[in-house]
Image (cartoon, helix red, strand yellow):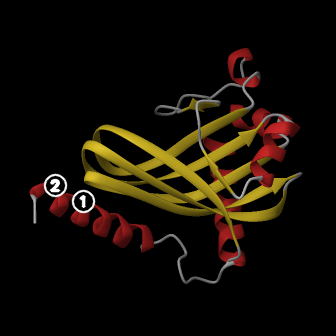
Amino acid sequence: MTQTRRALIFGMGAATALAACGNGVGGAGAATIDARADSTVNQMYSQYPGTRALGQKAAGMLVMPLVTEAGLGFGGAYGRGALRVGGATVDYYSLVKGSGGLQIGAQQYAHVLFFMTDSALMNFRRSPGWAAGANIEYAIPEGGETLAAETTTSLAPIIAVIFGKSGLHVGATLEGVKYTRIIP
């Protein structure tokens, strides 16, 4: 077995094991996801008050309370969350991410997608599996800074906010993310 194949097998195994830890896999299903999503939104609004304005303007929000990511050469991530429209959960989704490159480590974080237009939300909901692409504006708040809904972000059809990181994951990778509707 070549060194590359061993790294691939090890990386995929580590990512799968970590993804199953603390993400509600085999948990109480919808009730657990909803409780975690409520807590995540409350934490985000408390830590980053500017996101409240984004939430009020958004056609919908996909709240991924806990995404677990790990990698050693090859890596992956997994999380489950709730799609909220008008403050109510309308669907549940899983996030699966694959990556390859120079990387090592593991981390967990919260991830919220704000769908700023009805068409962006409709495209997301109608697709059988939606891959994140270049049409997403990432807003990553650092430290205790306030994230503001400024002109540049309010014009983007989809805004992703990533916060609450813990762990250490470093490297340079090529990656892809896919969101899929699930029944918890």
* For residue 103, above or below residue 148: below
- Residue 40 in the figure: left or right of residue 118: left
Task: Give the x, y percent position of residue 147.
Answer: 62, 29
Q: Which residue is mark 1?
A: 8
Q: Quadrant of the C terminus?
A: bottom right
Q: Look at label 2 and name its amino acid.
A: Thr
Residue that lies at the very extreme toward the front in this rendered image: 1
To which quarter of the image does residue 154 belong? top right
Q: Quadrant of the rendered structure where residue 182 is?
A: bottom right
| 19 relative to 128 in the view: left or right | left
Question: Which residue occupies 61% across, 28% down?
Answer: 146
Residue 148 to residue 105: above or below: above
**Nearer-the-camera pick, 123 or 54:** 123
The residue at the point 50 percent across, 58 percent down is: 67
Q: Can you tell which mark lies on residue 95? A: none
Task: Please tell me how crowded label 1 is: few (under 14), some (14-19), or many (20+) other residues with Cα within 10 Å.
Answer: some
Q: Residues within 10 Å of mark 2 (few under 14, many from 20)?
A: few
Q: Are marks 2 and 1 in contact (CB under 8 Å)?
A: yes
Percent across and percent down for residue 78 are: 48, 62
Kind of element beneath mark 1? helix
* Place of residue 119 in the rendered image (x, y in percent of width and height, measured from the top left): 85, 38
Residue located beneath label 2 in the image = 4
Cα gap from disc 2 to disc 1, whole angstroms: 6 Å
In this view of the protein, which residue sits in the foreground, 109 or 155? 155
Residue 48 visible somewhere in the drawing: no
Q: Is residue 36 visible?
A: yes
Find residue 92 and report its horizontal and vertical position in percent: 71, 65
> Residue placed at 67% from the left, 34% from the top?
159
Query: The N terminus is located in which quarter?
Result: bottom left
